[in-house]
Amino acid sequence: MKIMTYAEAVREAIREELLSDESVYFIGEDIGLYGGCFGLSRGLWEEFGEERIIETPITEGAFTSAAVGMALMGLRPIVEIMFGDFVSLTVDAMVDHAAKYHFMSAGQVKVPMVLRTPFGSGTGAAAQHSQSLEAMYLNTPGLKVIMPSSPRDAKGLLRSAVRDDSPVLFFENKLLYRTSGEVPEEEYFIPIGKGDIKREGSDITLISYSRMVNVCLEAAEELEKEGLSCEVLDLRTLRPLDTELIINSVKKTGRALIVYEAPMFGGFGGEIVSVINDSEAFYYLDSPVKRLGGEEMPVPYNPNLEKEIVPTVGKVCGEVRKMMGESYE
């Protein structure tokens, strides 16, 4: 194992895929000589040249559409959208075209491409650069959506995504870029559609993805001091979803709290509640399944307000205590 940051793990995954397959191209704004808005592509332009590290104008819809065409012709483009808020400009390319060609061609056409983007609050970037918009894409058959929480998962899942024959959206939380963790030195891949148990527990299951996994892990440590045992699930992939992992964990603990950064209304947490309630896990529940999401408001510029609109360790702990009820007291 070696220690590297989340950002380094993403860059290493891109570099290794560029080295292993000449059909892989990297496309986006400021990813060349500048090295990317968050520094993730430093050194790639110098190593691979401008033919494979393609800098674009500020035209997300246009260059994402170009990448769809490249994928249709047998290439494997990796597209970087500078901020996750701007994925809205790629909806036509990804939702109306990339997601549907395989189906409409009766399986004759593949669209092997990855759209990567940093998302989320916490950097003082205000309402138009801090959103969590994954739910926009989760209602689209044909797209895969990945949101890893650790450097190891980010590298292994990104390499798998580049080699997948379906269009993949890869969301990277901005506050995770500087976090560090162990990453295998040898080549490895993490299968798409498989979640992970980040912490074993017996009293309640905390279900999350991306940065909120780390918040849940911190909350689990705090609650352990009070005698509560929390199991923390990292979904890693939202579509396809590892429903078996969720069901088995909830059957074991009898309680489930879903934690995510996006506003709670209309968020992915509602789908997970349905998965649990429609499964045999429902008959093992000791209390109703609960969600803890972001507040119903645009992300504020004020740093104190920005911290409070998303789930925090304190909020997770408080919700768990309420859910435990009399058994906790």
Image (spheres, rainbow, N blue to C red):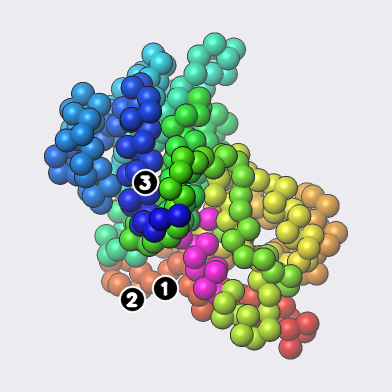
Along the viewing direction, whichever of 68 and 181 lies nearer the viewer: 181
Instruction: Identify the residue at horizontal 36%, vertical 56% (top origin).
Output: 4
By secondary structure, the bulk of the magenta-drawn segment is best described as helix
Give the structural element (helix, strand or loop) at label 2: helix
Identify whether 169 is placed above or below 110. below
Residue 16 horizontal/vertical position (percent)? 36, 36
Instruction: Identify the residue at horizontal 50%, vertical 14% (top origin).
Output: 109
Contact between labelled residues 2 and 1, with CB atoms less than 8 Å apart:
yes
Q: Tell me how far mark 1 sits from mark 3, CA to CA.
A: 29 Å
Residue lying farthest right?
A: 283
Q: Where, quadrant-wise, is the N terminus in this rendering?
A: bottom left
Residue that numbered label 2 is attached to: 304
Contact between labelled residues 3 and 1, with CB atoms less than 8 Å apart:
no
Amino acid of disc 3: Val
Give the structural element (helix, strand or loop) at label 3: helix
Identify whether 143 is placed above or below 42. above
For marks 3 and 2, the one nearer the N-term is: 3
Point out the frontmost of discs 1 and 3.
Answer: 3
Point out the frontmost of discs 3 and 2.
Answer: 3
Q: Tell me how far mark 3 sits from mark 2, CA to CA.
A: 30 Å
Residue that numbered label 3 is attached to: 10
Residue 94 horizontal/vertical position (percent)? 43, 30
The magenta stretch spans residue 218: yes
For marks 1 and 3, the one nearer the N-term is: 3
The magenta stretch spans residue 116: no
Identify whether 231 is placed above or below 105. below
Which residues, given as a range, are shown in magenta? 209-219
Label ID, residue 308: 1
Instruction: Identify the residue at horizontal 22%, vertical 30% (top origin).
Output: 48
Label ID, residue 280: none
Along the viewing direction, whichever of 183 and 127 lies nearer the viewer: 183
Instruction: Identify the residue at horizontal 50%, vertical 68% (top origin).
Output: 215
